[in-house]
Amino acid sequence: MKKISIILGLVALLCTAQAQNKKAVTLQERLAALTEIKDTKALQSALKKLERSKEEADRMVAYWYYYGQKNEEKIDAVQQAVMRDFPNGQLSIQEKLKEINSIKSLAERDFQFQALLKEYPNAPVSFDMYNMANAYAAEGNVEKMIQYATSYADRALDRNGNHLDKAWVLSNCAQILSRSNPQAALPYLEDGLAYHRSDLSKPELGDTEQIRKERRRRGEQAYYILLSSYADALGRAERAAESLQLVAAVRQELMLKPSTEQGNLEIMDGAYLNALLANKKYADALPYLEEQYIKGHTGVVTVDLLQKGYVERKGSSEGYEEYQAALDKTKIANAEAEMMKKLVSKDAPDFELKDLDGKTVRLADLRGKVVVLDFWATWCGPCKASFPAMQKAVDQYKDDKNVRFLFLHTWERGGGDATVNAKKYVIDNKYNFEVLMDLRDPSTKESAVAQAYKVDGIPTKIIIDPQGRIRFETSGFSGDEATAVKELSAMIEFARKS
């Protein structure tokens, strides 16, 4: 039997279509209803009715039910029947998209993509459009980047059902464009900054105070990340002095703000270091290089840069080996001290959640194991940035039956089915993660497990020892994969011995 394709975009489209009717039942609710049927004959009857339906949406309910049960024979049968009976349906379109996305030549992929859109103008391709926009941005092709980014903005909707702002979409693509064509990226980054300033100035209405607070925090973080990218693009566009002047002024402003906003200052500290290096001010950069090196943030810092800064400040390389050895000693001590700062000892709230296939996972059943909880969401940039490191950590412990990683998708937003979107993301990116869905309660608008663990920002990682007690809580991602894996491994080993 051929390998089953996991095709998720069509399900999001079906859910969107259903959402147009306030009384319509979502795909997730229909699947949940099937799993609640305990009588075998009644369940088989319901499934046969779905499989014989003249509506593709009904057939897909059966398809995803069988997928959740890992019944490959039925999955394949339903898939073939749907493709046969609905040759122009969403499943067929998604198969064609899969073939197009596998084409290595971007020009050929573009040709095939446009041909598909001509044949199927309403195909659910917004996510694919965004990927195409970024692919062209990486090549420095501004015209094609704009074409696809604009189409994506016209098709995709935000959590309120509104079309995405084009300036926001283009500024995201421009962060990639800045690597290949920094001068061309600058206007789009400037427009994006103006958009963020305008959005942050709007009154915060609706939702709970916690949601408003988190939305504000994310908005400010996105602004300073974009500002950092803008400063970097200035440096790459041979405007390094201007970049340094801008970043220095912004840092000065942030230093006067409450300590609760230090996360944004850390973002600009990184931009300041990059600006100093772009201006070849190695001696001025040395204190920041030392700080980043000691913290284990090796993404920017190299031994070569440390040596340049040392020589420029001291006037020669004499004593450099002793200097670096002292830094290394401090780095190890700092890593241990930082880990112990995060050490806690409190009962982990019990929970039970459904995984991506609808199966229930209970924390209580994992007593005796070290459990790593990773709270994330598909819209969270830092969460996704941390995933390559998390995959390395998962791989490191893949044969250890006494360590379990659970990735809790929380605070979902936007259109479509959150479970479908989460599944699509991890599958498309080939992550071998056990994902649980911490969905919002319709009445409270809160994600219950995130609330129970007092999560106030994502990504957040919780390490629970074999006795069911929380030992470590961390948030954010430094961008350094090696350091992140090493730190997480140290926490796991400490929790194991608790």
Image (cartoon, rainbow, N blue to C red):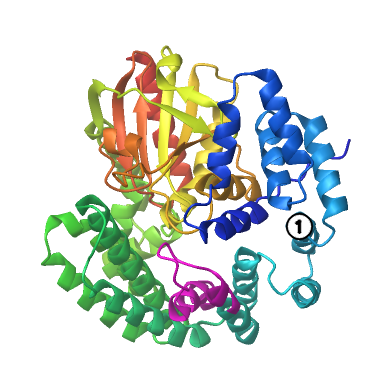
Q: Secondary structure at mark 1?
A: helix
In percent of width and height, residue 38 lies at 60, 19
Foreground pick, 410 / 244: 410
Foreground pick, 26 / 224: 26
Q: Which segment is the magenta one?
A: 151-179
Left or right of 260? Residue 418 is right
Picture residue at 80% right of the left edge, 40% below the top: 78
The residue where tag 1 is placed is 98
Picture residue at 38% right of the left edge, 84% below the top: 190
Asked where in the image residue 245 lies, by quadrant, the reply is bottom left
Visible residue check, residue 282: no
In percent of width and height, residue 277 lies at 38, 71
Q: In which quadrant will I find the C terminus?
A: top left
In percent of width and height, residue 47 lies at 72, 33
In the image, residue 433 sits, relative to residue 14, either above or below, namely above
Prevailing secondary structure of the magenta residues: helix
Picture residue at 70% right of the left edge, 50% below the top: 7
Asked where in the image residue 433 lies, by quadrant, the reply is top right
